[in-house]
Amino acid sequence: MKIQQISDIDKIVLKQKDTLYVPERVTVNTGMASCGIAAGADKTFARAVAEFGEDKHIQIRKTGCLGFCEMEPLVEIYQKNGPRIVYKNATEDKITDIINGYRESSYDKKLVLGQMRDPRSLLEEDVPNPLEGIDPAPEIPFLEDIPFYDRQIKIALRNCGYMDPEKIEEYMARGGYKAFLSALKQNDPRGIIAAIKDSGLRGRGGGGFPTGVKWESCAAHHGERFIICNADEGDPGAYMDRSILEGDPHTIIEGMLIAGLAVGSHKGFIYVRNEYPLAVKRLVVAIRQAMDYGLLGQNIAGSAFSFEMKISTGAGAFVCGESTALMASLEGEVGRPRAKYIHTVEKGFRQSPSNLNNVETYANVPVILSKGAEWFSHLGTDHSKGTKVFSLVGKIKNTGLVEVPMGTSLRSIIYDMGGGIPKKKAFKAVQTGGPSGGCIPEEFLDLGVDFSELAKVGSIMGSGGMIVMDQDTCMVDVARYFLDFLKEESCGQCNPCREGIKRMLEVLNRICEGDGREGDIELLQELGSMVHNFSLCGLGTSAPNPVLTTIKYFRDEYEAHIRDKKCPAGTCKPLFHYEIDKNACTGCTLCARKCPQEAITGEKKKIHALEQEKCIKCGICYEVCKFNAIQIA
């Protein structure tokens, strides 16, 4: 049905109540975001359809990601008279037994992760809850009580994993589009902007500029205005925006519609990186569905407001995440930043007033209008309101997405939710903010994560990437890795960035090859200061962060590389070799059996020997030894 007036959405919700929650059915939800599919969720889903697709008492559905990527594939099963259970590692060969076990009320403890407490959206208290009053499954905790989830508050991720992203009706049943239609009915653009300003929402793409102020500035300028969504998520290890696009694309459409209503815009663009094919596919479906329901196009819901939306795919240039470079790319030009003395809210896309926010920022907007600015502003810290989504990757037990209130400590995120460092190894550092972020050492683990606190220790919030490093990580090599990435991604338009990053990388390469010289550390600091102070755009001004913070907090590693010609972490191959500790070796033969070069010899239960001439320093023996007998020297 086409929405002709505001109240039509209530009819859709009532209709969905009867189709989404059929009491007699066992509903099987498979997490089908990119992370789940990479782990085999597509095969799990196909097997479930093949085995139970014809069964009238079972409904097989797909959803987005629940965030616990380490445990993928994740499958959730529920019905009227049973608990709502989430199963981890639900691979193709297990799904039949899982479903049958659930139907027979026999839960495999090895596969069960936890159970959902309440499937209702935090936006709508009257969304039907068919499972209310059900007793918990014995010995199976609620999902929210599991350490990975228990401190999370999901706003941007509120629908991911709970609904089929390719069905607009499910989004509506969870309160979707009500915030926009209510704002449309009130027809108070200034009121919308005031609510966003009062909420304290700041841009989640990295800069942290107050969203309401940006909207107000854009609305104040005359001419055709544009609403742009930056979905060009290019930070290594970051996939927050991708998860929202794949699991809840309609929330981005609704957020952009509200922004369009607020600033007086009738055209929107979503700029998505081409490496996100599933996100693009689901956005295409979502836009088509919104048009079919009359939520996009001319005279929306019988009003005078019209809004068109288009998708543009980028070629993967990291610099196109910068607002002016992104707009140049949208225009069909080379994606190069321009000087910011003229702001994009005045002259942006096609030299017209343009409002650009990233995916996560728009995802927060419908919630703020529904729950109120005061509700949102009570979350977080004084200068960083609300929640933030982080992607936990690297040397961490529980990789995945976490959404926590601003101000949550690094220790809580890494140890309570992330489960700490694998293999009982020591934590060394965490890098926040993508390749331009700083590396934060253990002494700052109790730091509350928000815009100002991270800046105090030389790092940035960025879009939310969080890469954890352990004792085996060489901080000099880390700085080299990120600088190499930024050198390739620099547009080359300004000398400080183009030449400065290149020169810094040459010095780091020399140090890691064992040719470091006295004065190299001071040279890196001098070059870093120059690049930071004189580069044209944010890529250049923040590029030295990984180098400068690793020098500040791990200077001893730089000195070991330069003066002692040693790499303490055993990463830079010219600067270390492996040795076998005779006092620790038990002669288990595991290292010898795993060595691809047959460089380790020795009889069982006797001390082994390592031939340095054959060793290629691949590190396999170091990883597999259970007795710490392989030492870095």
Image (spheres, rainbow, N blue to C red):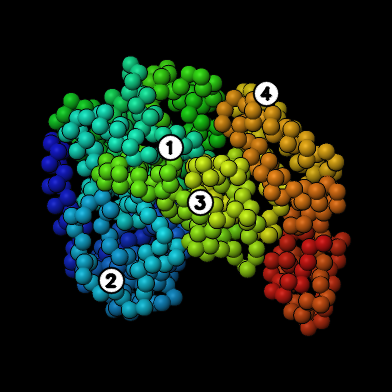
The quadrant the N terminus occupies is top left
Instruction: Mark yes or no: residue 226 visible.
Output: no
Q: Residues within 10 Å of mark 3 (few under 14, many from 20)?
A: many
Label 3, label 1: how many angstroms apart (C-alpha)?
Answer: 18 Å
Residue at 43% x, 37% y: name it.
203
Identity of the residue drawn at 64% across and 25% down: 534
- Callout 4 environment at 10 Å: few (<14), some (14 to 19), or many (20+)? few
Secondary structure of residue under mark 2: strand
Q: Nearer the viewer, residue 245 or 351?
A: 351
Residue farthest front in this picture: 382
Q: Gap between marks 2 and 1, in whole Å?
A: 38 Å
Mark 4 or mark 2: name the one nearer the start of the chain.
2
At horizontal 38% and vertical 39% (from top left) the residue drawn is 201
Of mark 3 and mark 4, the one earlier in the sequence is 3
Disc 2 residue type?
Pro
> How many C-alpha atoms fall within 10 Å of the one at disc 2: few (<14), some, or many (≥20)?
many
Given this view, does label 2 or label 3 mark the residue nearer the observer? 3
| Residue receiving disc 1 | 203
- The C terminus is located in which quarter? bottom right
- Sequence-wise, the earlier of marks 3 and 1 is 1
Disc 4 residue type (three-letter) = Asn
Which disc number belongs to residue 495?
Answer: 4
Front in this rendered view, residue 86 or 263: 263
Residue 181 x/y as whole percent: 20, 37
Amino acid type at circle 1 is: Gly
Q: Distance of mark 3 from mark 4, alpha carbons?
A: 36 Å
Q: Residues within 10 Å of mark 1 (few under 14, many from 20)?
A: many
Instruction: Give SS at disc 3.
Output: loop
Name the residue tied to disc 3.
448
